Image: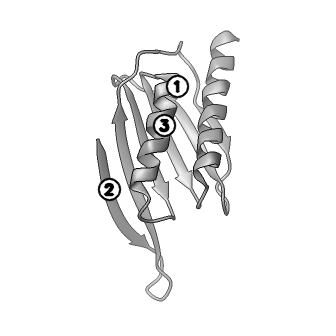
Amino acid sequence: MTHQNVFEIGEPQGHIAVEKLHFDLTGQHMPAPFAPVLVGVVGSGNLEVLLEPTAAAGCTLDITTSAHGFAPIWQAVVEDFQARHGLTGVAVSINDMGATPAVVSLRLDQAAAALSMKARA
């Protein structure tokens, strides 16, 4: 499922518009209890990914992006991530400043790898 909202923040002469996307995806791999995982930084052409435990079934992804009109591409990237990792009980928050799909996939995989490392520790 995808829900989109566009809103503006900022001063009247300098609005910054961001797009918010939400995805609920099914999963089958419940990680061991974990502390939140944060990877990446919010900067031009980059993004940060935060993984947090949740009691909800499946994997929720909330994306805030400065790039408008790319919901179908975001959907393809997050569905590919979920097909590979199948997380459940995980909330993913992404703050994006125009990262390419390859960078998004890299950061999501980096977060999943960090989550795996925490589970083994």
Q: Toward which corner of the image does residue 36 lie, by quadrant?
A: top right
Circle 1 or circle 2, nearest the eye: 1
At 41% across and 64% down in the image, what residue appears? 69
Q: Nearer the viewer, residue 107 or 16?
A: 107
Seen in the image, is 95 located left or right of residue 19?
Answer: right
How far separated are the C-alphas under marks 1 and 3? 15 Å
Q: Tag 3's secondary structure?
A: strand
Could you tell me how far apart the alpha carbons at marks 3 and 2 are, in whole angstroms? 16 Å
Q: Is mark 2 on a helix, strand or loop?
A: strand
Which residue does the numbered mark 1 point to in the structure image? Answer: 84
Q: Where is residue 39 drawn, in percent x and y?
A: 66, 39
> To which quarter of the image does residue 57 belong?
top left
Q: Which sits earlier in the primary sequence, circle 1 or circle 3?
A: 1
Q: Which of marks 3 and 2 is nearer the N terminus?
A: 2
Residue 60, above or below 41 = above
Q: Which type of secondary structure does the marked residue at label 1 adopt?
A: helix
- Residue count near mark 2 (Cα–Cα under 10 Å), binned few <14, some 14–19, many ≥20: few
Position of residue 106 measured from the top left corner of the image (x, y, whole percent): 65, 40
* Residues at discs 1 and 2 in contact (Cβ within 8 Å): no
User: The disc labelled 1 sits on which kind of residue?
Assistant: Arg
Q: In this view, does 67 lie above or below 40?
A: below
Residue 92, percent from left and from top: 48, 37
Q: Name the residue under label 2.
A: 4
Residue under pointer 3: 92
Mark 1 to mark 2 CA distance (whole Å):
25 Å
Quarter of image, res 8: bottom left
Quadrant holding the N terminus: top left
Of marks 3 and 2, the one in the foreground: 2
In percent of width and height, residue 49 lies at 58, 42
Dots 1, 3 in contact, CB < 8 A: no
Q: What residue type is labelled 3?
A: Val
